[in-house]
Every structure is written in structure tokens, then in C-alpha cells.
Image: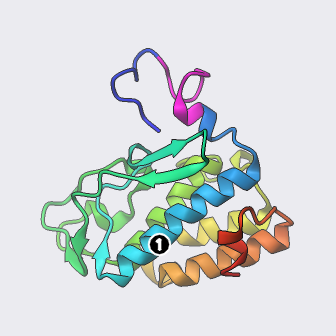
Amino acid sequence: MNEHWTYDKHPKYTDEKSAFYKYIRLDSTKLISSLYEIFEFHKFVSSKNYVAIDFYDGSVMYDFNTDKTIICDIDLYRRKPYINEMGRLWGSSRFMSPEEFNKGDIIDEITNVYTMGATAFVFLGGEKDRNFDKWHMGKNLYEVALKAVNPERKNRYQTIKEFIENWNNALLLDGIPEGDSSISSVM
């Protein structure tokens, strides 16, 4: 989503040539399907006992011709649980949980739930301004994303699987199209 070699020439929010600009303007079915692929990838990562470190919008590529989402730049992912040994970890603060700023804190699946919620806010509206008036989807989906980014770990979903289940239920409640069969097959 971030074309580093042309970033100065094509601001991602305002320039029609920016991949990010095009991506966040996809129809809701395609955008929700793409987010779902990101969530499912991180559920898989967790099942292999890893956690995401430094995941952000620059880790996502989207092929507008085939509607395929590709995740890249995962070289900093670590075995879980990972102990924050440096204080502020690598990454964009738009995607980072409070524990990613504190030396000695545990980075685990609950941390990655936060990252998935933050991802939803970056792509569906608001980024770090998480007021509903910035959100571009339904209220139920907003509530799921908001719980995922709760600063208190105990108040977040405890697994990515639980987050995805609630996300899927919110899609139905909000009447948002399910998208391709990969979404409906897990609901």
C-alpha cells in the first residue's frame, strides 16, 4: 500500500495514483474480503506460534487485476510469546498496541488482536482517530474493531480466532456483503 519509491510524488490519501488511495476505495465486498485474508493469515501465524512484529499497511500488497491480497515483509515476526526487549518496537504507531512501546511487556496473540483491529481502522476509517464518524462501515463492525484496540489487554479479544468470529457476526448484523466464498465458508 505504500510505494516507497514514489511516496513523495503520490500522497497515499489524496492521490489517485496511490495504491492506498485505490485500495480504501474498493467496493465493500472486495475490501472486506481483503481484510479477511489479512486476519486469516495472522490466525495462521498464531497457529504456528508466531506473533507479528512490524506489521503495517506497507506489509500489504493488493493486485487490483486479480483482487488478491499478498502479505510481505514479515521478517521481524517472532516466536510467541515474545518479550519486548527494546521499548518501542519497530513499526508504525498506527498499528501498535501499548505493549509494543514498553520494555519487558509480553507480545503475544492478544497483541496481534490489537494489530488486526488497528488494521481495520486504517483501512476502514479513522486510523488513530477511532470515532464512529470516521468509520466507513456499520456500527457492529466498528464495535468489534474498537474492542480489539482496547488499551487494556484483558478487555480485548483473547485470540485472533475469537476476533474473526465476532467480525463475521458483525458483518451479518450490519448487512455487509459477505464477499467471496472464503468468507462465507468459515461463518
Assign the magenta stretch its main secondary structure.
loop
Q: Which residue in the rendered view is the most extreme toward the front? A: 66
Q: Is residue 14 magenta?
A: yes
SS assignment at label 1 = helix
* First to last magenta residue range: 10-21
Q: Is residue 102 magenta?
A: no
The image position of residue 159, as x and y in percent, is 47, 83
| Count of all numbered marks drawn on residues in the image | 1
The image position of residue 26, as x and y in percent, is 69, 42
The image position of residue 169, as x and y in percent, is 74, 78
Q: Residue at x 33, y 65 (%)?
A: 52
Q: Answer above or below: position of 35 versus 91.
A: below
Q: 132 or 22: nearer the eye?
A: 22
Q: 7 or 45: nearer the eye?
A: 45
The image position of residue 51, as x and y in percent, is 31, 72
What residue did someone put label 1 on? 113
Q: How is the image coloured?
A: rainbow
Q: Residue at x 71, y 63 (%)?
A: 180
Q: Is residue 117 left or right of residue 144?
A: left
Q: Residue at x 39, y 43 (%)?
A: 58
Q: Answer above or below: position of 108 versus 125.
A: below
Determine if residue 95 is in view: yes
Q: Picture quarter containing residue 172?
A: bottom right
Q: Amino acid at mark 1?
A: Val
